[in-house]
Image (cartoon, rainbow, N blue to C red):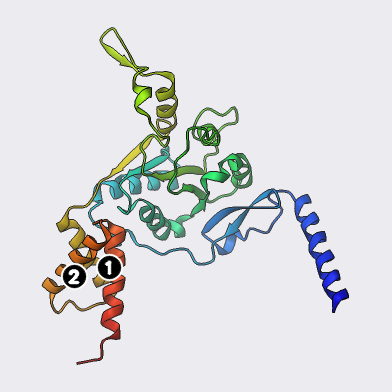
Amino acid sequence: MEKSEQVLARAERLMERIERLLPAGGREIGWENATAFRWRRAYGRGYLEAVRHPHRIRLGDLHNIDEQKGEIDRNTRQFLAGLPANNVLLWGSRGTGKSSLIKALLTEYAGRGLRVIEVEAGHLADLPDIVDIIHDRPERFLLFCDDLSFEADDASYKALKAVLDGSLAGATDNLLVYATSNRRHLLPEYMGENEQARLRGGEIHHGEAVEEKISLSERFGMWLSFYPFSQDHYLEICLGWLQRLGVPLDDPEDVRREALRYALARGSRSGRVAWQFARDWAGRRGLEPPA
């Protein structure tokens, strides 16, 4: 038994050494069988991993963000048609549908060649490798950076700036960046930085620190803002999800009271809380014995 364990340990170490020698794109990606991918790292190397079961959300499931939905849908259709289109920054309140909107675009347009690659903020330095891998692919790719933000001393945002605009290498035509964030400028902003602003000829000129932060978000050609939902909008979303889950609304007023109580306990009336309430309500109704 002890010898077998030693053999297995040696085999594992050997496999680790082989993995380190493999190029970043040396793994089988499986383009034909997947529509969503994640960028992963192992043994100091990056690679694309197919997402076997992507989250299926439909554009019609997302309520009270019709303006944002229309803008990003139009931009995505331009992209799929080979027309000029912009990178998009979706910023604003948490739980208002920013990430869900990008997932819904994949559900809507995967049949037309749209693909999504999710990249964590910590892996943005690998963006040039990702661009090289997909450069000659016929599909159209959205580089999805969820909940994107950077600390003041984080230099990885420079890799994102280079891909968006400003790199010596030309941007690939089959890639756009769709990022979500709670911050419009993606970097923390401090009161002291505003003291560097100067008034020249009647115009305000920001200091270098502020200009650096603004320059990153300005590289996104489209900004979509998301705001907290009103009570009526929150309730509408709750009812919409319950309808999607097939829950009969025998007493809508009771549902509304419980939905508001649920939101009060969570301290938020976001779309995410509405979805969580709908799941909770549907589950509880499912446990009740038939009348």
* 203 to 194, vertically: above or below: above
What residue do we see at 84% from left, 64% from top? 10
Side of 162 where 15 appears, left or right: right
User: Which comes sooner in the sequence, label 2 or label 1?
Assistant: 2
Q: Name the image quarter holding the C terminus.
A: bottom left
Side of 52 where 79 appears, left or right: left
- Please say if the residues under marks 2 and 1 sit with CB atoms less than 8 Å apart: yes
In x, y percent, where is residue 230?
Answer: 17, 53
Side of 275 where 44 appears, left or right: right
Residue matched to label 1: 277
The one of 199 and 72 positioned closer to us in this rendering: 199
Q: Name the image quarter holding the N terminus.
A: bottom right
* 42 to 148, vertically: above or below: below
Looking at numbered disc 1 in the image, what kind of residue is underneath it? Phe
Q: Judge the density around disc 2: few (<14), some (14-19), many (≥20) Cα neighbours within 10 Å.
A: some
The one of 49 and 72 positioned closer to us in this rendering: 49
Task: Name which quarter of the figure residue 212 lies in.
Answer: top left
Q: Judge the density around disc 1: few (<14), some (14-19), many (≥20) Cα neighbours within 10 Å.
A: many
Looking at numbered disc 2 in the image, what kind of residue is underneath it? Glu
In x, y percent, where is residue 24?
Answer: 69, 49
What residue do we see at 25% from left, 51% from top? 65
Task: Name which quarter of the figure residue 11 lies in.
Answer: bottom right
Label number found at residue 258:
2
What residue do we see at 30% from left, 52% from top? 96
In x, y percent, where is residue 33?
Answer: 57, 64
Side of 234 where 26 appears, left or right: right
Label number found at residue 207:
none
The one of 220 and 109 positioned closer to us in this rendering: 220
